[in-house]
Image (tube, grey):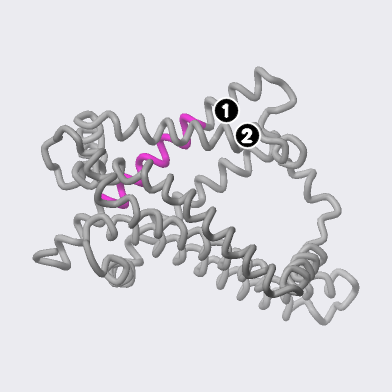
Amino acid sequence: MNSIKNCLRRAKKRPGLFLFVAFITLLTTALEQYNPWTRANASFGFFKGFDYISILNDLANSVAEFFRNPKVALLTIAAGLFILFALCVVLGLIFSGFFNQLSNATFDKPKKKGEYRVGIGRYTFKLAFYFMISFILTVLVTVAVMYSAIPAIMSVKQFFLGSAGMLLPTILLCAITAVAIFFAVVFFALYITYVLPSLIYFRKGGTGVAFRMVNGYCWYLLPRTLGYLLVLLGIHAALWAIHYGLASEAAATCILVATWMLRTIVNFIYFYFVFDIFTAMKSDMFDTE
């Protein structure tokens, strides 16, 4: 309860924090809802006739074809990384001031003029590298998780094709796969999340500090991060269930506003919690920076 009161009190002192999260959430929610792919595919009907193994085979074949000409592949990757870094610099410019203000708020520092500008000067390139590496790691982890599920899916297919003796091995394999994927995703989200405030609070060695903190406090942090991920997943599933209300313009607008408001509240609370609890852990584990 005290954490909620502190959050509201600090948000009142710096209303720009909540407005920033609201604006970014509105932008991303609108882009998610109003794009051609969402209009055409974002409903559970998309999974009718969905062949998971075939899609992964096509992906593997596409990658093999891409690297058939190594020189062109390397030049394409280099150009892609350059474009990605440029986009991440833009994100760094946008978010560096916000995270500087948020860190000052969690330390209960008096509000000063130019906090956003100071954050841009200090953290833009740090955050650019953070966003870039996070994006690449997220893609790699997603691909690894997708391919790690193949044995369980194949086992389920064999069972439904009439292999009655496959029941127990199928259950065990599915359970092990589900547990492994669960911990892989949640711990990846934990590390990625808590590296962010560590980069803001520490000039050097922030990544190592974040890993030590997550390892030391993981069973306290895990339920909060898991809850956040489940809420976002639940919102996404509900949107797919109703196809974002796109059958009607009025319904789509109402869904957009409701989704935006809910996500704004959830995102702000989680951002605040991450920086606030990191401040507490920092005080607990270190006497000085």
Residue 232 as seen in the image, left or right of residue 60: left
Q: How many labels does the image show?
A: 2
Query: Label 2 is placed on what type of residue?
Result: Gln
The answer to whether 75 appears left or right of 5 in the picture is right
Helix, strand or loop at label 2? It is: helix
Task: Name above or below for residue 266 compared with residue 130.
Answer: above
Mark drawn on residue 244: none
Q: What residue type is labelled 1?
A: Leu
Where is residue 253 drawn, in percent x and y?
A: 60, 22
Query: On the picture, is 152 further left or further right than 121?
Result: right
Give the residue displayed 78% in from the left and 62% down from the top: 55
Residue at 41% across, 55% down: 225
The residue to which callout 1 is attached is: 256
- Mark 2: give few (<14), some (14-19) or many (20+) Cα within 10 Å: many
- Front residue of 91/248: it is 91
Residue at the image position 33 percent from the left and 32 percent from the top: 18
Q: Name the residue under label 2.
A: 33
**Does residue 266 belong to the magenta stretch?**
yes
**Residue name at image x 69 percent, y 68 percent:** 72
- The percent coordinates of residue 143 (x first, y second) are 63, 67
Is residue 280 inside the magenta stretch? Answer: no
- In this rendered view, identify the residue nearer to me: 110 or 94: 94
| Earlier residue among tags 2 and 1 | 2
Tell me where the magenta segment starts and ends, as one range.
Answer: 260-275
The residue lying toward the viewer, choosing from 91 and 46, is: 91
Residue 211 location, quadrant: bottom left
For residue 149, above or below residue 283? below
**Residue 275 at x, y = what percent?**
27, 51
